[in-house]
Image (cartoon, helix red, strand yellow):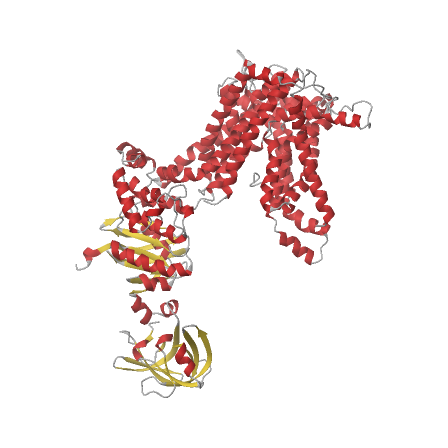
Amino acid sequence: MTGEKDTIVHIDNITKRFGNVVAVDRLDMKIVAGEFVTFLGPSGCGKSTTLRMLGGFETPDEGRIVLDGVDVTRQPPNRRDVNMVFQDYALFPHMSVGQNVSFGLELKGQSRPEIERRMTELLDFLQLSGFRDRTPDQLSGGQRQRVALARALAPDPKLLLLDEPLGALDAKLRGQVQIELKDIQKRTGKTFFFVTHDQEEALTMSDRIVVMNAGRVEQAGTPEDLYFRPESRFVAEFIGETNLINGTVRGIDDDRVVIDWNGLDIRGSGHGHRPGEGDNVTASLRLENVVCHPKKPSRENAIEGRIVSKLFKGSRTSLDIRVGEKEDTVIRAYMDAGNAAQISDDQLWISWEPERLTVLRD
Amino acid sequence: MTRNTRILMSVIYWAFIVYLFVPLALMVTMGFKDSKFIGFPIRSWTLDWYTAVIQDTEVLSVFGYSMTIAISTTILSLIIGTWIAVFLGPNKFRGKAIIFALACLPAVIPGIISAIALRIFARLIDIEPGMFAIILGHTVHNVPFVALVVMARLSTQPKSHIEAARDLGADSIVAFFRVTLPYLKPALIGAGIFCMLLSFDDFVRAFFLGGYQPTLPVLIFAKLRSGMSPEINAISTIVLIMTAILGLWAERSMRRLNKGS
Amino acid sequence: MTFWGALLHNGTYQAVASALFKTQRRQFLILASLPLFWIFFANLGPIVEMFWIGFLDSYPPKVGHEPQFTLANWAAFFQDQVFIVPFFRTLAFSFIFTAITLLITYPVAYFLAKHVKRKNQLLFLLLLLIPFWVGEIVRTYAIMILLGNNGAVNLALKSLGLIERPIPFMYTGFSLGVGIIYLTALYMLLPLYSALEKLPDNYLEAAADLGAGAWTRFRRITLPLSKEGIASGCTLVFLISTGYYATPVLLGGPRSTVFAETIAGFFHVAGDQWPMGAAFSSIMLIATLGVTGLFLKLMGRDGKGMMR
């Protein structure tokens, strides 16, 4: 029973097909009130379809959507307490900013003074007061995004849907808007359902990330979980850059998994997953978790290697390091640019915390 | 493209412009001739023909009659044409191509045949020749133009606009009136003026569907059959100026379609 | 409350709206109702009725006589030269006028689309459009003034000393052609212009780069890629030019009588001959649509999207 009360949306085992294509496959998920949850995945993974089903623009073929205890599966969009920020913002071009924000309030049947009060409040809140009488085509991208947000927040929805709302912004602005958006979510206490294909966006803003692939959930968890403890190869590769290491399990030593990697013994962690001895496994090692040493360190997982290539990337340098005898055993690592410059010799040693080498489940 | 062909083509363009404008310019000029006899040379000039036309109660009443028909036709055509566009534009169904072709049919049927068919049809549904018959005929002819213009505009409206309206609490009717209709406005103004011109200028339908009261083109036709006279030039010139103004206005509002928003 | 807010919360409105939009299907049917009614009633109705009347021996119905089915009206067409000659003359005229219009307007459209600067194109196009807003009758009258015995052309030729007596342009196929082309040129020009405007310049540059001369470029690149425009333009001009009535009456003569005049005769001159007029109109409709259908087929199009 605990936590049940806080569930604002229950996506109850929904499936959606378009012709022969299964867009969303038996998705089952609870969203907690006040949560910033992000659905992340490549295009066509079913994240947008899920969002559209929550908004009422698509009807699931199977399953139910329960919003705050009420089954809304077959309710049209205008009968749900759910509002949406569209990818292209969909601001009405013939209405001013004020009229756009008032639109939902008006249709809710609120009185004029009430509409006026709420609209002014929202414009103030989103720093749009000066733009009230402008039309959307007189606004910058960032301003439009805020108007769309104000308009969707105005009717006080139980759930706010955001469909890649930062896609139209340039890279520089995007970072700033991410912070703003997270801040607004915190201050309003609204439940945000955010959809994106941009992993950085997801990592920055979300309380919880749901990674989708081919209509199914690959993994759901906090940004840290997904980044450092991916469960599948897909998640490990989709979020951030990583080294994938293929090897055979030699044994389990306490919490550590010992892997034979081309004749080298290395140690990683299953994070609760315990593969059997002799299994072929893949493990993920983030670039920044690879530590480089000029001399042999007295640590676990210390391996000698040779730098194959060095790429200067501004604040840091990425190194490709060949280890062991075989040609294809290359590990990529990040180093601070300053430290990298000190390594004069091509020969060096690398190591990592066993915690950081995550043995994947598939 | 060589220099010579370029020059040749610009010559053809300007010659074509001359072909278009000279007859009209001559017609306008002849309206100021101080003689009953149409033709060159013109020895003296007068405004008498214009003052006569403005005082001619018959011409004025015919003008009003034509205007009434044009405005009624325009309103009806806009409503029906827009409805057809909204029906045919976004929806997909079996036989849509045939319905679309049938919807456009009146625009390509030769004028005389359309007029005859409507004359017979008016008899069948018991409409006497006269204003209502002409309005019906003109509306049938104009609806395809409205439908095509509105469909073109409708196809540029992002689907998200309607979804946003629905999301914010509008049902399909409210979404149409609050979001789609304002978006269509420039197309509707353009198509509306175009309808007025088509109706006001039309001869063949007005001729076969009309009763005793003539429309302006029918009146000019009747006057022409009994002989050319500068009075006709004066009437025609007034009509020409009016249509040119309306046409430019229509063109302006249609051009706004191409701009974003 | 605002108007729309009040409307949405009005009980009667809610009841009506929820009844109307209960299912997607019902909503679709309501949306389809007026368009389908209009298309079948107003667009198709008159044509079907016209065909039907063509098979009756008398119409409008007279007291004491029930209209009988007959093929006589259709047969009459094939039995009298008075009918057949104007019929084929109309088709021939329209065909010739269409061809001439194409030849005249193609360079104009090409010049406009390819040689005029993009920002000036609107202005140049507008210049062409203005005369076309003027009605059929007024423009026909303008041609009468141009070509009359005391008209501008004869005056000019006389003052140049090229002729002694005025050339009788009027009331001939020539004057009719000048008039019809004057009326229909726009319907050719606009499709041609929009087809040529879409043609990217770099196609021609690529062809030139590959060694194609001006004529080859035109024949191999420009012409095939403007086929759409040619097809739509010719279709429109052909169909529209067969349908003029006032212009042939005013500009044509006894030797250039067109079928529109023949048809009109049944409705104006000779009392009760509607069935024959209806049958003749049907024949003309079949012929014109048949010719254009064949033409579009030859151009490699299925007639779909003929309007665009």
Q: Is residue A26 left or right of residue C222?
A: left
Point out the image quarter for the C terminus of chain B.
top left
Residue A42 is situated, as x and y percent measured from the top left of the image, at 40, 61
- Who is closer to the viewer here, C48 or C288? C288
Q: Is residue C78 left or right of residue B193?
A: right
Residue A278 is situated, as x and y percent measured from the top left of the image, at 34, 81
Q: Is residue C258 above or below residue B170?
A: above
Q: Can you name the residue that lies furthest to the top here?
A: C64
Residue B81 visible in the displayed image: yes
Residue at 44% over, 86% down: A345
| Residue B220 image-quadrant placement | top right
Q: Can you name the residue that lies furthest to the left here?
A: A1
Residue at 48% over, 39% down: B151
Residue B162 is situated, as x and y percent measured from the top left of the image, at 39, 43
Q: Is residue C174 left or right of residue B88?
A: right
Residue at 23% over, 48% down: A70
- Who is closer to the viewer here, B164 or A106? A106
